Amino acid sequence: DQQVKQNSPSLSVQEGRISILNCDYTNSMFDYFLWYKKYPAEGPTFLISISSIKDKNEDGRFTVFLNKSAKHLSLHIVPSQPGDSAVYFCAASARGTQGGSEKLVFGKGTKLTVNP
Amino acid sequence: GAVVSQHPSRVICKSGTSVKIECRSLDFQATTMFWYRQFPKQSLMLMATSNEGSKATYEQGVEKDKFLINHASLTLSTLTVTSAHPEDSSFYICSARDPRSYNEQFFGPGTRLTVL
């Protein structure tokens, strides 16, 4: 049972336009969400995160939106740059108010290609 | 962000041999480290949680006698793949939570294991 789903295996956008990567989750206990960027044969690099008490978090060109009722989050990159081309993983954890679990559950990733 | 290293980055071994992979937190102390495995075009799957000074916690379906984890110090965790078989060939990635950072896990660059 896949608790974190990234239904688009790939996305291609033009440089300067907006990239929107989507992620859905099924476990209502998840309360912290993260996006990681990964190049081939490298470990993931943390990009941005959001707690379930928020519905938006922004960091430079990256914004993450969380819709708890729909169990959906998205990562917006604007403007997109060729260097953003990579695989983007959505991850979730259920930390709770008592510390909960640090375990991350990952989606399968979306390969973003930004064309010059 | 915090720096996590892994060694070796790439290893090729014969079937039946054992391989040790090291994961180090370079600029912080990590009481907890995590070991993941990634197959091509798949998600990162958590194998086990490595706790300094105590036994690792393995995820369901992961053989603890095959994947030996030792977290002997606050900056080093090792994963030993014992009696490796070709089906163990994969990309192994470790992560650690920096206590200075509330929720983000920082990942190592990964180790590509190929078992012939």
Image (cartoon, coloured by chain):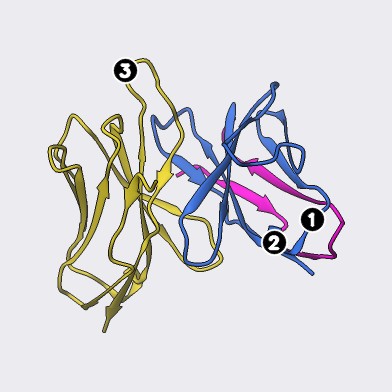
Which chain comes out yellow in the rendered image?
A
- The answer to whether any part of residue B10 appears in the image is no
- Secondary structure beneath dot 2 equals helix
Number of callouts: 3
- Secondary structure beneath dot 3 equals loop
| Three-letter amino acid code at the position of disc 1 | Ala
- Secondary structure beneath dot 1 equals loop
Which chain comes out blue in the rendered image?
B
Q: Quadrant of residue A14?
A: bottom left
Q: Are marks 3 and 1 in contact (CB under 8 Å)?
A: no
Range drawn in magenta: B1-29
| Three-letter amino acid code at the position of disc 2 | Glu
Label for residue B84?
1
The residue singled out by tag 2 in the image is B87
| Residue B103 place in picture, x, y as percent | 39, 33
Q: Which residue is located at x 28 percent, y 66 percent? A: A8
**Which residue is outermost to the top?**
A98
